[in-house]
Amino acid sequence: MSRLWNFSAGPAALPQAVLERAQRELLDWQGCGASVMELSHRGKLFMSLAQQAETDLRELLAIPENYAVLFLQGGATQHFAQIPMNLATEGASADYIVTGHWGEKAASEAAPYVKVNVAASSKAEHYLRLPPRDTWQLDPRAAYVHYVSNETIHGVEFHDVPNVGEVPLVADMSSDILSRPIDVTRFGLIYAGAQKNIGPSGLVVMIVRRDLLERPARPMARIFRYADHAANDSMLNTPNTWGWYLAGLTFQWLKEQGGLKAVGERNAAKAGLLYDAIDGSGGYYRSPVEPSARSLMNIPFTLHDSALDADFLKESESAGLLALKGHKALGGMRASIYNAVPLEAVQALVSFMGDFAKRHG
Ligand SMILES: *Cc1c(COP(=O)(O)O)cnc(C)c1O
């Protein structure tokens, strides 16, 4: 068996220690004689796992009591639609800050349920920078302001939480949640698909201020109502128990890593190493993203001659570096270096990039 250094954008690398523990426990979890996947979600054992995962997440992010934590399904994409269903009354409008592919998707999926006001967009700049905060056309009557804290495809990330006044701020943090400490109290709602920085696909973690769950909602089935999920401890129906278990193991692993401050410092060092290699390559490699908006999680880069792309991909894979092909929106390469990707992986990539440039001149 050989595990390669995995730079996949998502589903992405999981911490090896988490996978090894899941492997050890796969057939007989906690001596109960069955796999965690084979247990009732309503049983005592699984309930205590679920509770512990929430407790650990609350500790990692210092989530206050007036926020509910939900473990949902449907991917971030389903919640693009479900968020306006829950937070906006019929006829209301919401502000969208569009800084890349996922922000665009969020706005278009919301459109059947809320009047979407694109309050700022960097589309004209090909999403390679962030629209300056003083240009945002925010509406103080908006039901909420939605933004994507890290655009996974374009590799642009907010390094501060934007100030939007009293209107609740809603963040799609799918690809940078738990990558550093954040002040949860600045947000009305945070959500993230698990498959980038938390666990396997099929799970969505949501952190929502409880007063927002009491907003008068349009008629809808209970399964769509966040308030019902909260009132039932995310067990309105059968949750993704396997995903919840793995997320819980990841939260424990993050605590063992020293918590989010230490993890954030490591992530900054990893990204710094790769950006320095790109910027110091004399133009052999280029980052298309404006430096102040560069993501610490997803790093797109191009080669000076795209005719070399195929060789780069073939040779990098032979060198044990997986999934570096860039998204078609930008071409070239993309290295996703989430929490589970260690510094050694980035060192291996940087060393390969140097060798490749020498060999291919
Ligand atoms: C991957 C991703 C999504 C889509 O997630 P699904 O689970 O496929 O719905 C949405 N937003 C961001 C920022 C992402 O990285």
Image: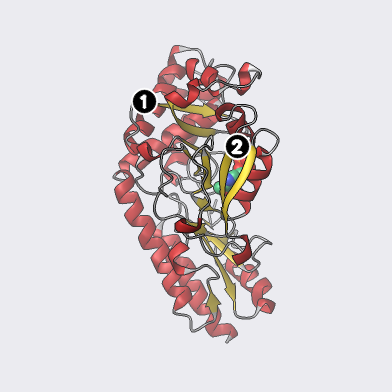
Above/below status of 349 relative to 175? below
Q: Which residue is at 40% across, 22% downward? A: 51
Amino acid, disc 1 = Asn
Residue 294, percent across and down? Answer: 47, 63
Q: Measure the alpha-carbon separation of dots 1 and 2.
A: 25 Å
Residue 9, percent across and down? Answer: 57, 53
Depth check: 32 or 46 in front? 46
Q: Which residue is at 50% across, 58% downward? A: 135
> For the residue with label 2, is its CB less than 8 Å from the closest atom of ligand 1?
no
Q: Quadrant of residue 257 in the image?
A: top left
Under tag 2, what secondary structure? Answer: strand
Task: Locate the C terminus by quadrant.
Answer: bottom right
Under tag 1, what secondary structure? Answer: loop
Q: Quadrant of residue 195 in the image?
A: top right
Asked whether residue 19 appears in the rendered view, the answer is yes
Q: Which residue is mark 1?
A: 66
Asked whether residue 9 appears in the rendered view, the answer is no
Residue 139, percent across and down? Answer: 52, 43
Above/below status of 63 relative to 271? above
Depth check: 96 or 327 in front? 96
Q: Which residue is mark 2?
A: 93
Nearer to us of marks 1 and 2 is: 2
Amino acid, disc 2 = Ser
